[in-house]
Image: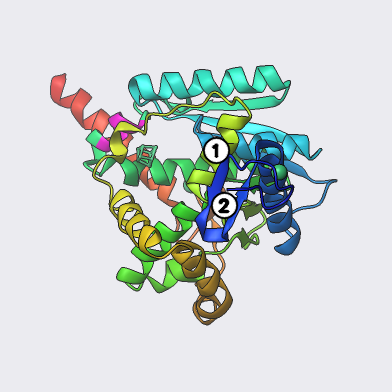
Amino acid sequence: MKCTRCRAKAEVQLRAHNAGFCRPCYLFYFRRQVERAIAGERMFTPGERLLVAVSGGKDSLALWDVLADLGYDTTGLYLGLGIGAYSEQSHTKVAQFAQRRGLALRVVAFEEEAAGLAVPAVAAATRRPPCSACGTMKRHHFDAAAIDGGFDVLVTGHNLDDEAARLMGNVLRWQKDHLARQRPVLLPTHPRFVRKVKPLYLVSEYETAVYAFMRGIDYIVDECPNAAGAAQLLYKDVLNRLEVASPGTKLAFVKEFLRTGQPAFAQTEREAPRDCEGCGMPSYGPLCAYCRLVREVQSKASAGASALA
Ligand code: SF4
Ligand SMILES: [Zn+2]
Ligand SMILES: [Zn+2]
């Protein structure tokens, strides 16, 4: 196959786009995809300060790489979840990337916030699935770090596969609230929220993997051990099978939802949040989900301590 742009020998074939690229043209294409998403959805402008959530995986590091190359003012945010070797290795990958590229990195380690707040400990204390506890804690710390650091935008590396799998999950249960908020740009609904954007929302996992490989980005290949068995992986598998049979399915699923389906759900969006009485962050009840979780952990810990006394 020949490169769609320059007719040299193609190194990558993208069936969903009916295109192939040599290495330099692929890097050009990938950056253009990101630039188009940013411009098309008015995600941010060159003068704004971006906080890029980086997990150590290929998507977030590839995104940070592109944004830095495009000249944006970026700072990375790494959350230390406390999930054993996975967390240690992913932290190392992020720190090495930031150092090599000379980029600023902020690190928030859950277990250093207060005792017992590593994800496995919170999940055990509250008897919640680890991903549920983790999701609540991540959302809180992303929002808090963005506002505390004076950033304009929180940028995440969710890709097309993530968005398609999430959409499938939301549709299968007709989760109207979630469908109302599934967009590549979320505008703040509270003074302590910042804009949240996903510049890779139309770029597939395969495309970011190829970009990361070509750029020599050293990322963590292993998934979080808690990901195994998660519904998201099942949806991704189903979508991949559909994609093989009919290339472009994922792209059409997400794009058409955003164009035709999402506006109908957006009208049902819930009311604006108020201030959490515990931490001051936005909340839909007296206490936000994070503060409720932390209090539950603390009350279990004190109950455990008094039982031992
Ligand atoms: S798989 Fe679950 S526990 Fe692991 S990082 Fe993702 S949400 Fe957190
Ligand atoms: Zn080419
Ligand atoms: Zn709170």
* Mark earlier in primary sequence (1, 2): 2
In the rendered view, does 211 fall on the left or right side of 292? right
In the displayed structure, 88 sits above or below 155; it is above
x and y percent of residue 287 in the render?
44, 52
At 50% from the left edge and 22% from the top edge, which residue is drawn?
Answer: 91
Principal SS element in the magenta part? Answer: helix
Tell me which amino acid carries mark 1.
Answer: Val
In the displayed structure, 86 sits above or below 12; it is above
Decide if ligand 2 comes within 8 Å of the CB at mark 1.
Answer: no
Closer-to-camera residue (45/21): 21
x and y percent of residue 144 in the render?
58, 41
Q: Which residue is label 1 attached to?
A: 210
In the rendered view, does 163 fall on the left or right side of 1? left
Res 125 → quadrant: top left
- Cβ atoms under marks 1 and 2 closer than 8 Å: no
Q: Which residue is label 2 attached to?
A: 203
Closer-to-camera residue (253/301): 253
Helix, strand or loop at mark 2: loop
Please say whether residue 121 is one of the residues in the magenta stretch: yes
Decide if ligand 2 comes within 8 Å of the CB at mark 2.
Answer: no
- Eye-nearest disc, 1 or 2: 1
Please say whether residue 9 is one of the residues in the magenta stretch: no
In the rendered view, does 94 fall on the left or right side of 98? left
At 81% from the left edge and 38% from the top edge, which residue is drawn?
Answer: 71
x and y percent of residue 300 in the render?
24, 34
At 67% from the left edge and 56% from the top edge, which residue is drawn?
Answer: 191
